[in-house]
Amino acid sequence: MRDPVIREFLLGFWKIHILYHAEEQGVYGQWMIEELGHHGYRVSAGTMYPLLARMARRGWLKSTEPKGSRDARVYRITPAGAKVLERLRASLAELQHEVRPSTARKSRRAARRRA
Ligand SMILES: [Zn+2]
């Protein structure tokens, strides 16, 4: 992962996305890779699987042992993960309100007027 934007920002976005879908219906690695693909992100298995495992170690996701060797490991959100998601939702809304393009344009115009 050489792109610093991925490491510094997008990884966080993807984790929020994972929490969201883990709360909705549960996720597995390949499904999540495809889901992020629909959103225009190319995430490798080498990034996704350790990410899911790390989030499980943190106690935000819980997986059940796959029944067969060909079955996917499904991750679901835990109560602790749901709390994190709730907290991030508030931060996201606040951030979105601040940085969305129309607001930025307006405040830049206002700054120019003041100058
Ligand atoms: Zn999604």
Image (cartoon, helix red, strand yellow):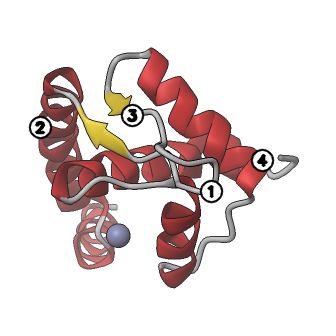
Q: Residue most toward the top? A: 58
Q: CA distance from mark 4 to mark 2?
A: 28 Å
In the image, what residue type sits under mark 3? Ser
The percent coordinates of residue 14 (x first, y second) are: 48, 52
Q: Residue at x 43, y 25 (%)?
A: 56
The percent coordinates of residue 33 (x first, y second) are: 58, 65
Q: Nearer the viewer, mark 4 or mark 3?
A: 3
Residue occupied by mark 2: 86
Q: Which mark is residue 63?
A: 3
Q: CA distance from mark 2 to mark 3?
A: 21 Å
- Quarter of the image with the C terminus is bottom left
Label 3 neighbourhood size at 10 Å, few (<14), some (14-19), many (20+)?
some
Q: Residue at x 41, y 47 (%)?
A: 74
The percent coordinates of residue 11 (x first, y second) are: 57, 45
| 88 relative to 69, above or below | above
Q: CA distance from mark 4 to mark 3?
A: 18 Å
Q: Which element type, helix, strand or loop, lies under badge 1?
A: loop
Q: Residue at x 25, y 65 (%)?
A: 107
Mark 2–mark 1 contact, CB under 8 Å? no
Q: Quadrant of ligand 1?
A: bottom left
Label 2 neighbourhood size at 10 Å, few (<14), some (14-19), many (20+)?
some
In terms of depth relative to the viewer, which is nearer, 76 or 68? 68
